[in-house]
Amino acid sequence: MWKLILCALLLLGDFALSAATVQLKDKASVSGKILAEKADQIVIDIGYTVLVIPRNQILSLLKDKTPGAAAPRPETMPAPVMAAPEAPVLALSSPPPSAGGHGFYSPSTGTLKERSVRELAAELGAAVVQVRTPAGLGSGFFINEDGFLITNFHVTEGETQISVEVFQQKNNELERKIYKQVKIVSLNKFGDLALLKVEDKDAPKFAHVSLGDSDTLAVGERVFAIGSPLGLERSVTEGIVSTKTRQLQGALYLQTTAQINPGNSGGPLFNMRGEVVGVTNMKITSGEGLGFAIPVEVVTFFLKHRDSFAYDNDNPSNPYRYLEPPSRLKKSSLQ
């Protein structure tokens, strides 16, 4: 069983600050800057922490091309020395690439043409779902055919009993289906994102959406949202991008006039090419037309590093999930 161990920079040897992608044997991958390469391990900076990866768990190392350098080529790792057998481990959340060749999610191709909201809503509606917990409900959307979907962290916060309601095309009609075996794969509390997976035995291949690029959006550009405001599933609202850089609580959001209400949380905000450019997550209740969405770049970062945000109900030290400190009341009662 391999482990990615957090390491202090002061303990590292010589730094070789070159960007690279490390392909692991379990089909997961890690991208960042190589800080040190040793005989038995590689030290890589992934932006918010430093990982030490044993060589015997690395399938290949692909270094990015630098100006004037030769084209990058995979570096095959030498065969590891035989060691004692390890205990079986649970598979990571990374599935094999889909048959479509897009990998875990479908990025924008940049070739789609703009269409009407009517056409796009009819085509994309089956990929948008309603997410229910004992505490409430929200929205979500499938990112691949294998049942992986995105929603907001606050929709699933503190909950493990999650169901997903899907509307699928069958005989030119929409058929409602509820899936109750839903697994929490990864959580990012500070980014307000959650990655779930439908694991019902009778689950089919799901319709899914592609992720676009919010950097190419222009202020005033038309967008639309699909979700379940107040439990009214498959509701479509249209608006424009009011601003791309609205700062709230230290983070940047897309602001839109598309109507966002409780229940829309976790649903997709689409551009007119049918690509997801944001994840709707809040509104200002004292005004109208003041909705906000998490930019899709935050979503793709979360998905690329989903193993760093992996959820394990048996592990109290889950990434970015901390125990609450004792309150003053509790502290005073103990004295």
Image (cartoon, rainbow, N blue to C red):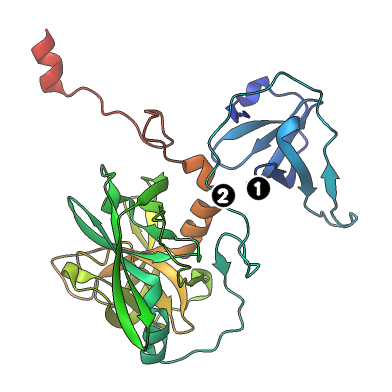
- Residue 255, given in percent of the width and then of the height, sits at 33, 70
Q: Of residues 207 and 61, which is closer to you in this image? A: 207
In the image, residue 258 above or below residue 266:
below
Disc 1 designates what residue? 27
Which quadrant of the structure image shows residue 251?
A: bottom left
Q: Amino acid at mark 2?
A: Ser
Is 121 on the left-hand or right-hand side of 66? Answer: left
Q: Residues within 10 Å of mark 1 (few under 14, many from 20)?
A: some
Residue 241 visible in the snapshot: no
Q: Amino acid at mark 1?
A: Lys
Q: Of residues 287 and 90, which is closer to you in this image? A: 90
- Residue 90, given in percent of the width and then of the height, sits at 53, 36
Q: Residue at x 37, y 84 (%)?
A: 121
Residue 216 visible in the snapshot: yes
- Which of the two discs, 1 and 2, labels the residue nearer the N terminus? 1
Is 104 on the left-hand or right-hand side of 222? Answer: right
Q: Of residues 84 and 17, which is closer to you in this image? A: 84
Disc 2 designates what residue? 94
Count of numbered badges drawn on the protein: 2
